[in-house]
Image: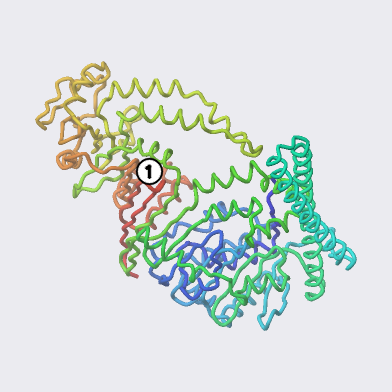
């Protein structure tokens, strides 16, 4: 299906750099005052009700984006000179975010809201209009470019529109008044015919009842024919009425567009809208950036019939997910699908209007708005109604930062939810004081795998879409997973009782001079969570690959594996195995031994749990780099990578992914420290 995609030019990209420089870092916030201007039917929202201190937050962002790195990451903007200037602006922002935001009139705390008015995206940020004006004038001068400037209800507006090369903006011709009159008469005629047909149906139905009472066979047949004819007429008049109403709406919209075109001096077309009033700076994209009515909505001059503040939607999200005031985000999939399948929302009307200018897109959208596509797409959206995200903790100080971020993809399909939950098991984790350099754990209840494969087979067999656009998904339902099911049954038999596994690396020492044995020493542990470790050991004894664990004691004492391994270990490295609580742990090294002694019970119920210690990682990388040969260390890419390590804040990052009663949830907890500036 064709997607509306306005032309991107140098002028648009350069002007967009204004908002990019402000947005980079994604730590922004939104004031409660602003959500009064956000429609309740916004397709998405990103913002907060509590300002974020610029200096504290951006000081925690690693300063790894040097000139060369950013030049490689950012694509060419038509000419190299523009790219250099753009890279320079981003570099200045990262070097001193507080200074740059101050220059643009944003102050030392950020407050913003990103949302949509219908289909059109809007970014609103609190700031000083005069200071912003000074900076944007400087931007125009530096790039030797000018925005298209208009004044709307006392507000000066800049519009960055796609450049037209080799053609002129098409003019809109207002329809002749007689065309609109004829369309109105066609609607009225269709309504009148429909009313008449319904009266005929009512009369025929009454005649049928009388004929039945009189047992008049001939009368029954005549009345039945009259009912059939009336029903056909009703159906035909309804279709005619829909067509007539569409034609009338199209003519009325064309008339309105033509009138707007006159009021804007003949200007029309899509573009980036940049405006500033006394409270906010606004960046928005409009399918017709000169439309007075659309400008009223995008600039907040016309408040929505029902705002996000009035609906309490954000409050409910924060309460349900225990989010703080700093940040909240959502995408409403149901509103998006409604807009694409002929709904009544402003977004749906804008989609239809944009599509009317492109024949292929209009045909595709008409297909989506009809059954079976309309119903099947809306059912999919009902199953995946929304994505939400926010911060449960956001603590930033001069020397530290702790951020607990959460994301959830809501899944309102009980059978699928329960099936996915069969995947989750127990990740063996530890409360050890020795943090792992990195760890990765997967919780999988092996005993549930046969049931999982069976339920997956049943659910996949139900996938059957009649909508042409969704028909490729039917191949999923035709997938033969019998081999997977058989494998799951065999694996569950060999590894009965396993609930999960984790790999934990505490320290590693490399031998840079050895090509055969690059690892000189490793402090690491592999832990296997089990419902009954004794039963698991009995099972492992029957597997030739695990014969080394045949005599593993069950009393918690460690057994050396060095002499049992088929390959030698590096000198000085000793590998142990032990049953610890409800876990079997294979480990080597002091910190791994401490982990083994503390891991205890099953651990954390989840699907995936991972940690990463940046302090230990950087320390190890520095040790490795010191041992590298001089010619390797002098390599430009290696040297650049090693120098970037010094920019990272020191601390821990924790990740978890899980299947819950609400859907799929992801959580990230970061705790960092830095030197006070």
- Horizontal side, residue 79 vs residue 640: left or right: right
Q: Residues within 10 Å of mark 1 (few under 14, many from 20)?
A: many
Q: Where, by quadrant of the figure, is residue 530 drawn?
A: top left
Residue 490 percent location from the top left of the image: 34, 20
The residue sitting at 65% across, 74% down in the picture is 296
**Quarter of the figure that contains the C terminus:** bottom left
Q: Is residue 590 left or right of residue 503?
A: left
Quadrant in the picture for the N terminus: top right
Taking the image as drawn, is residue 119 in sight? no
Q: Is residue 260 at all visible to an observer of this figure?
A: yes
Residue 471: x percent and y percent? 62, 34
**Viewer-closest of 46 and 379:** 379
Q: Position of residue 138 (x, y in %)?
A: 63, 76
Q: What colour-coding does the image apply? A: rainbow
Q: Nearer the viewer, residue 658 or 510?
A: 658
Residue sitting at 44 percent across and 74 percent down? 109
Q: Which residue is mark 1?
A: 659
195 lies left or right of 337: right
Using the image as rendered, state which of residue 576 and residue 293 is in the foreground.
293
Quarter of the image where one finds residue 464: top right
* In the depicted structure, whether residue 52 falls above or below residue 436: below
Residue 632 position in % (x across, y down): 42, 41
């Amino acid at each position: 299906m064709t997607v509306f995609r306005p032309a991107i030019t140098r002028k648009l990209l350069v002007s967009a750099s204004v908002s990019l420089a402000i947005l980079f870092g994604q730590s922004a916030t939104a004031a409660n005052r602003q959500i009064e201007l956000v429609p309740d039917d916004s397709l998405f929202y990103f913002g907060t009700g509590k300002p974020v201190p610029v200096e504290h937050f951006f000081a925690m962002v690693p300063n790894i984006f040097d000139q060369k790195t950013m030049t490689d990451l950012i694509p060419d903007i038509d000419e190299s000179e523009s790219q250099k200037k753009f890279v320079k602006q981003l570099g200045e922002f990262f070097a001193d975010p507080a200074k740059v935001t101050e220059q643009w009139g944003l102050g030392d705390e950020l407050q913003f809201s990103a949302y949509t008015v219908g289909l059109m995206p809007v970014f609103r940020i609190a700031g000083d209009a005069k200071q912003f004006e000074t900076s944007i004038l400087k931007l125009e001068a530096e790039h030797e470019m000018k925005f298209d400037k208009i004044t709307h209800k006392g507000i000066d507006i800049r519009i960055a529109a796609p450049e037209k090369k080799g053609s002129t903006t098409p003019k809109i011709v207002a329809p002749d008044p007689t065309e609109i009159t004829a369309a109105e008469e066609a609607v009225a005629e269709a309504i009148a015919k429909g009313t008449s047909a319904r009266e005929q149906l009512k009369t025929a139905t009454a005649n049928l009842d009388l004929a039945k009472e009189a047992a008049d066979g001939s009368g029954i047949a005549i009345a039945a024919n009259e009912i059939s004819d009336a029903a056909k007429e009703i159906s035909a008049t309804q279709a005619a009425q829909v067509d007539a109403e569409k034609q009338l709406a199209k003519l009325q919209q064309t008339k309105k567009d033509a009138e707007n075109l006159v009021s804007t001096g003949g200007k029309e077309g899509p573009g980036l809208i940049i405006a500033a009033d006394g409270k906010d700076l606004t960046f928005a994209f409009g399918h017709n950036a000169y439309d007075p009515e659309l400008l009223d909505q995008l600039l907040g001059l016309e408040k929505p019939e029902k705002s996000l503040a009035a609906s309490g939607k954000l409050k409910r999200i924060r309460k349900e997910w225990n989010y703080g005031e700093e940040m909240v985000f959502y995408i409403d999939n149901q509103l998006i699908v409604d807009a694409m399948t002929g709904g009544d929302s402003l977004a749906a009307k804008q989609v239809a209007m944009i599509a009317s200018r492109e024949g292929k897109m209009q045909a595709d959208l008409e297909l989506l708005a009809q059954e079976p596509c309309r119903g099947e797409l809306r059912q999919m959206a009902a199953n995946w109604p929304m994505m939400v995200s926010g911060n449960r903790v956001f603590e930033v100080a001069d020397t530290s930062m702790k951020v607990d971020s959460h994301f959830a993809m809501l899944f309102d399909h009980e059978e699928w939810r329960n099936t996915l939950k069969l995947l989750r098991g127990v990740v063996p984790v530890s409360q050890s004081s020795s943090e792992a350099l990195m760890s990765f754990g997967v919780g999988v209840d092996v005993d549930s795998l046969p049931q999982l494969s069976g339920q997956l087979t049943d659910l996949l067999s139900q996938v059957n879409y009649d909508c042409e656009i969704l028909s490729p998904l039917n191949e999923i339902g035709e997938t033969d997973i019998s081999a997977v099911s058989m494998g799951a049954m065999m694996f569950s038999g060999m590894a009965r009782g396993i609930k999960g596994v984790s790999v934990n690396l505490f320290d590693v020492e490399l031998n840079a001079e050895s090509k055969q044995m690059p690892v000189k020493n490793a402090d690491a542990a592999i832990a296997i969570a089990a419902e009954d470790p004794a039963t698991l050991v009995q099972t492992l004894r029957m597997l030739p690959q695990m014969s080394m664990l045949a005599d593993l004691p069950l009393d918690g004492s460690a057994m050396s594996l060095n002499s049992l391994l088929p390959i030698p270990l590096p000198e000085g490295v000793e590998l142990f195995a032990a049953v610890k609580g409800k876990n079997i742990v294979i480990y080597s090294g002091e910190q791994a031994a401490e982990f083994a002694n503390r891991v205890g019970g099953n651990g954390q119920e989840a699907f995936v749990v991972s940690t990463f210690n940046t302090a230990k990682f950087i320390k190890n990388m520095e040790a490795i780099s010191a041992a590298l040969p001089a010619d390797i260390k002098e390599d430009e890419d290696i040297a650049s990578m090693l120098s970037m390590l010094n920019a990272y804040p020191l601390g821990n990052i924790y990740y978890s992914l899980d299947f819950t009663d609400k859907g799929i949830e992801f959580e990230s907890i970061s705790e960092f420290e830095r030197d006070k500036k």
